[in-house]
């Protein structure tokens, strides 16, 4: 990489972009732009499509908070799986940290929802209002009515897309086919319509109106992202030694005394954040690479080598050198450990939840044979993808007998409360438990096991009460 030595003899000059950002962002073709739109297509295909996908009659990805369930690619997760979900979130955070340490705000430039939806809204704006140059020309000509009409059409299109995005988000919490039917019938729930309008309005505000201001002033990641990188992190960089002093025309750029940069301002015009990369590294830069595409086109047209703006580290390190950094290895090791933890928890996961509560309405009673009976309420939640019959056993006291309902079959993802009677054969058992008659409460354990899967077993402790 070129060194910055010698630049002080001819100071760098900065000029404002020729197309102000208020007239919109220019479009530019190029490899980074293609990658960006491929990411937009992939992420939105997943976002808009997964809410409609189902597996064995259940959503492939969905959140059912009324049943305290999360459907995730065929698995049914419940409250007992919070640690598994936490590890997944930790793995995602570690992956983001590793990417930031390697290539700066690469996630922001290609996969961040703010970037994705801003790109979609800018595309709509370009189709309905024209390029920034066309908008400037209409402003000079005073075509206010045409400008207002195009702007109103743009806002209407933004509103429609925002509502569809809001509807799709709600569809992850309420099954999409049923939600679509009730939407057409105007029979949305008390939280569904407000949720749709809130998230749709939030998207309209963020992607349509605020845009780059979110990245510059509202995004917390932009503030601490610099801590994640170092002098060897790859970022979008301008080769000042090669580019300065800037030429004011293609003819001057061909002069050996002039730098490669012809000061066209396209690198600023295409930047979604309005950053002039020629001023050096800036926290507002989202590393989308569009300025590289624009500059490479100019270099090609002026018959100069491309790469005046490029991904590089201040020290000129290559990607292999960056990946060998100790911090990258630490991030990789932690990420691998988190993923291994997720895999181990998934393999050892027991998709059965058991809660035991002694019936307080009937504390204890004595039958005609002199035995003691206690009633319990067992709540079983089946988080497996198949229905199961469950066997219930009790231990802790001699001679205990359990009377369960005739049917203990529970469908996948369903919960059921069973009333269970536990009987002690005779009151004499109380004397064995407490010969001095000072204690009339004994401890016992309930064990629930799926009849078709020995691994699905839960044990919970409770108490057995003897009457005085």
Image (cartoon, helix red, strand yellow):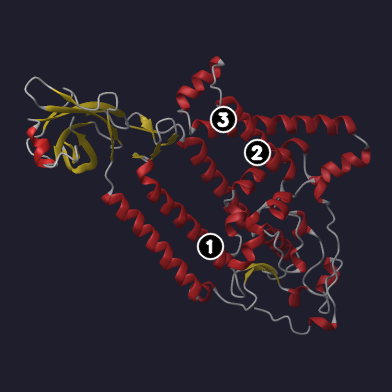
Quarter of the image where one finds residue 57: top left
| 130 shown above or below 107 | above
Mark 1 near mark 2, Cβ–Cβ under 8 Å? Answer: no
Residue at 45% from the left image edge and 31% from the top image edge: 52
Number of the label disc, if any, that sits on residue 367: none
Label 1: few (<14), some or many (≥20) within 10 Å? many
Q: Residue 232 versus residue 316: which sits nearer the camera?
A: 232
Label 3: few (<14), some or many (≥20) within 10 Å? many
Q: Examine the rendering and report whether any part of residue 272 can be seen.
A: no
Q: Position of residue 158 (x, y in %)?
A: 69, 34
Q: Where is residue 103 in the image (x, y as percent from the top left)?
A: 58, 65
Q: What element carries label 3?
A: helix
Residue at which label 3 appears: 167
- Image check: 451 left or right of 28? left
Residue at which label 1 appears: 97
- Where the C terminus falls, by quadrant? top left
Quarter of the image where one finds residue 292: bottom right
Residue at 77% from the left image edge and 62% from the top image edge: 276
Residue at 7% from the left image edge and 30% from the top image edge: 426
Q: Where is residue 413 in the image (x, y as percent from the top left)?
A: 32, 32
Q: What element carries label 1?
A: helix
Residue at which label 2 appears: 203
Mark 3 near mark 1, Cβ–Cβ under 8 Å? Answer: no
Q: Where is residue 92 in the image (x, y as percent from the top left)?
A: 48, 55
Q: Residue 408 versus residue 137: which sits nearer the camera?
A: 408
Quarter of the image where one finds residue 428: top left
Q: Examine the rendering and report whether any part of residue 195 can be seen.
A: yes
Report how far apart the C-alphas of labels 3 and 1 lie in the structure. 31 Å
């Amino acid at each position: 990489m070129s060194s910055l030595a010698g630049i002080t003899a001819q100071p760098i000059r900065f000029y404002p972009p020729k197309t102000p950002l208020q007239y919109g962002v220019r479009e530019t073709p190029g490899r980074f732009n293609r990658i960006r739109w491929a990411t937009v297509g992939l992420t939105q295909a997943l976002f808009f499509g997964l809410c409609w996908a189902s597996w064995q009659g259940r959503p492939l990805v969905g959140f059912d908070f009324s049943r305290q369930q999360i459907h995730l690619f065929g698995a049914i997760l419940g409250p007992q799986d919070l640690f598994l979900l936490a590890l997944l979130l930790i793995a995602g955070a570690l992956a983001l940290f590793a990417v930031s340490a390697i290539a700066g705000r690469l996630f922001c430039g290609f996969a961040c929802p703010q970037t994705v939806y801003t790109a979609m809204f800018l595309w709509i704006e370009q189709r309905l209002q024209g390029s920034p140059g066309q908008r400037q020309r209409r402003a000079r000509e005073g075509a206010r009515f045409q400008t207002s009409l195009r702007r109103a059409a743009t806002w209407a299109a933004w509103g429609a897309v925002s509502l569809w995005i809001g509807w799709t988000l709600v569809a992850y919490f309420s099954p999409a086919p049923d939600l679509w039917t009730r939407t057409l019938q105007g029979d949305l729930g008390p939280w569904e319509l407000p949720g749709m309008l809130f998230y749709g309005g939030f998207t309209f505000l963020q992607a349509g109106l605020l845009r780059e201001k979110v990245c510059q002033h509202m995004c917390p990641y932009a503030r601490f992202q610099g801590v994640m990188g170092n002098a060897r992190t790859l970022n979008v960089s301008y080769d000042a030694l090669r580019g300065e002093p800037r030429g004011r025309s293609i003819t001057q750029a061909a002069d050996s005394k002039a730098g490669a940069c012809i000061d066209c301002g396209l690198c600023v015009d295409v930047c979604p954040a309005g950053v002039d990369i020629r001023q050096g590294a800036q926290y507002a830069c989202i590393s989308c690479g569009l300025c590289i595409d624009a500059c490479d086109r100019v270099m090609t047209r002026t018959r100069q080598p491309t790469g005046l703006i490029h991904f590089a580290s201040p020290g000129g390190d290559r990607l292999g050198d960056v990946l060998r950094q100790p911090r990258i290895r630490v991030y990789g090791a932690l990420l691998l450990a988190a993923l291994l933890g997720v895999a181990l928890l998934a393999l050892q996961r027991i998709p059965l939840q058991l809660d035991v509560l002694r019936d307080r309405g009937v504390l204890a009673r004595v039958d005609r044979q002199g035995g003691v009976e206690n009633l319990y309420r067992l709540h079983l939640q089946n988080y497996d993808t198949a229905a199961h019959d469950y066997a219930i056993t009790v231990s802790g006291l001699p001679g205990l007998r359990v009377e369960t309902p005739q049917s203990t079959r529970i469908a996948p993802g369903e919960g059921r409360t069973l009333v269970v009677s536990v009987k002690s054969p005779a009151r004499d058992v109380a004397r064995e438990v407490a010969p001095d008659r000072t204690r009339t409460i004994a401890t016992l354990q309930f064990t629930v096991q799926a009849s078709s899967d020995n691994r699905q077993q839960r044990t919970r402790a409770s108490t057995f009460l003897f009457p005085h």
